């Protein structure tokens, strides 16, 4: 039996939605916790399947994991054992690659295969591996698994050819116990990287420069347990903001950091969305009259996030004129366009761009969540479509959106899950 999400479109949304802790921060904070030599408590942990998958990986390594209250997790690595990572669990998500940096940093050895996660075109990890090698590790491939080992990790200067989020975090984790100083140049600047460095510094690490493109890590001998609260999820926030712009009368999105969303908010202002930005919330009101088409180019933070272009595409089907989305991070990240066309959209993809002609009415159809943010895009399209939309492959959506159906139904949407024969 497989599960699908069904949405009856056309219901106007009203009310307030609270944004959960950041998926992309959480999935790095959890592996980073094993670098401590005592229990780490993290609060604001979203209830998503990526977190469940990571807790299985932790328990495989003998780490004690306790879920407390609603959103607290206690991770105690005191009795952990470094052994090869179980492939089936590793391939469930992208972020399992953070165990490479964390285990290498703590034990000088890690053995695991390629991580999973959304297929957005090729997603190599060469920059992570080059970074580990620069720190003194050897990397070899044994029967399809990476074996990364080092007698001693030594600080050095590492220039990233691409400012990769994953490579920046992974090298930072591998370097916290290295001898001497590591400098990462052309480092990524995403807010989730700052969150991970904040956790590591609370444990006792010496990391400076996060949020700029030069990060300096001075190796230390010991890291201790600590308490940390995760930043709000800027991609979940963006999804609900776009969804409100598409389908709400009046909706407030709360528990957000508006500075993390500036590239989106300025784009929404440009296309004519009526919004009020507060210290920790955004209020969106129904827009009378046509939205303006625009041009969007995805870029590393603080530029327009690639994870947001897919949800935004659903809204842009309702704008007057032609919107052009150009992907510079994952040039093949356009599968959602094909699904939207099944619902009546008029989108032409010529990699690395999509050309969205609007406005086009959307109609309920059977569509596939080919990846996480494609799923978010189809949910938004389903909310404004006439009739019923059925979305399959929804395990992608559950990787990154906490209680999506509950949050939307509380706002007045009609969304539910059904089991179907395979
Ligand atoms: C768990 C997590 O945080 N996922 C996010 C993270 O993914 P992830 O960390 O995998 O993305 P990266 O920032 O590493 O990727 C950026 C670009 O660099 C390339 N690259 C990356 C590493 C490498 O070794 N070699 C290489 O060529 C990638 O193919 C891509 O074109 O950042 C992406 C870009 O903001 C987001 O879409 C993902 O949601
Ligand atoms: C691509 C994403 O996730 P991951 O890197 O975990 O596959 C995403 O969050 O949009």
Image (cartoon, rainbow, N blue to C red):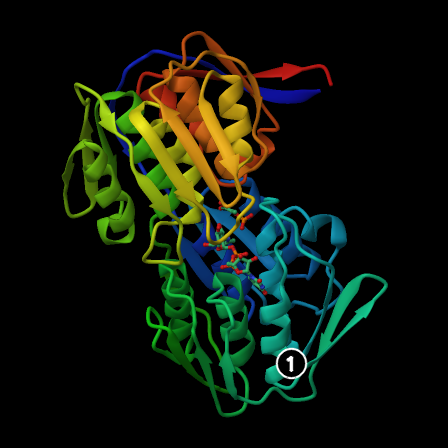
Eyeballing the image, is 339 above or below 36?
Answer: above
Residue furthest bottom in the image: 180
Residue in front for this viewpoint, 143 or 402: 143
Residue topped by disc 1:
133
Quadrant of image for the N terminus: top right
Residue drawn 68% across and 61% down? Answer: 62
Can you say which quadrant of the picture contains the C terminus? top right
Left or right: residue 368 compared with residue 176: right
Residue 340 image position (x, y, % from top left): 49, 24
Q: Is residue 69 visible?
A: no
Toward the top, the furthest residue is 387
Under circle 1, the secondary element is: helix
Quarter where residue 31 is shown: bottom right
- 369 or 22, which is in the foreground? 369
In screen coordinates, is 115 left or right of 337?
A: right
Task: Indicate if the residue with disc 1 has its beta carbon within 8 Å of ligand 1.
Answer: no
Q: Position of residue 322 (x, y in %)?
A: 34, 30
Seen from the viewer's position, the closer of residues 295 and 11 is: 295
Judged left or right of residue 154, residue 406 is left
Residue 390 at x, y percent in the picture: 54, 16
């Amino acid at each position: 039996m497989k599960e699908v999400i069904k949405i009856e479109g056309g219901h106007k949304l009203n009310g307030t939605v609270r944004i959960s802790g950041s998926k992309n921060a959480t999935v790095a904070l959890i592996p980073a916790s094993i670098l401590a030599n005592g229990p780490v408590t993290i609060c604001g942990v979203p209830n998503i399947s990526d977190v469940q998958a990571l807790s299985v990986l932790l328990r495989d390594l003998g780490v004690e994991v306790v879920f407390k209250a609603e959103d607290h997790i206690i991770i105690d690595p005191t009795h952990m054992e470094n052994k090869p990572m179980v492939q089936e669990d590793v391939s469930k998500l992208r972020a399992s690659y953070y165990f490479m940096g964390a285990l290498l940093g703590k034990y000088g050895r890690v053995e695991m295969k390629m991580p999973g996660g959304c297929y957005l075109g090729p997603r190599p990890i060469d920059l992570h591996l080059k970074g580990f090698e620069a720190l003194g590790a050897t990397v070899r491939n044994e029967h399809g698994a990476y074996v990364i080992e080092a007698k001693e990790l030594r600080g050095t200067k590492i220039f990233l050819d691409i400012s990769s989020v994953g490579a920046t975090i992974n090298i930072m984790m591998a370097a916290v116990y290295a001898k001497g100083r590591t400098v990462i140049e052309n480092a990524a600047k995403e807010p989730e990287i700052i969150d991970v460095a904040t956790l590591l510094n609370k444990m006792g690490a010496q990391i400076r420069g996060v949020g700029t493109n030069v990060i300096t890590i001075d190796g230390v001998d010991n890291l201790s347990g600590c308490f940390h609260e995760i930043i709000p999820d800027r991609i979940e926030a963006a999804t609900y903001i776009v969804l409100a712009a598409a389908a709400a009368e009046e909706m407030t999105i709360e528990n957000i950091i508006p500075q993390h969303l500036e590239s989106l908010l300025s784009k929404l202002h440009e296309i004519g969305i009526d919004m009020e930005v507060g210290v920790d919330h955004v209020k969106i009101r129904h827009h009378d009259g046509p939205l303006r088409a625009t041009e969007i180019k995805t870029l590393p933070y603080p530029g327009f996030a690639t994870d947001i272009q897919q949800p935004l595409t659903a809204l842009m089907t309702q704008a007057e004129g032609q919107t052009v989305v150009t992907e510079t991070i994952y040039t093949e990240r356009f599968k959602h366009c094909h699904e939207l066309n099944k619902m009546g959209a008029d989108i032409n993809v010529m990699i690395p761009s999509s050309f969205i002609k609007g406005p086009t009415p959307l109609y309920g159809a059977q569509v596939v969540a080919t990846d996480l943010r494609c799923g978010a895009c189809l949910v938004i399209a389903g909310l404004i479509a006439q009739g019923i939309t059925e979305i399959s492959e929804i395990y992608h959506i559950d990787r990154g959106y906490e209680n999506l159906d509950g949050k939307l139904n509380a706002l007045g949407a009609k969304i539910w899950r059904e089991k179907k024969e395979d």
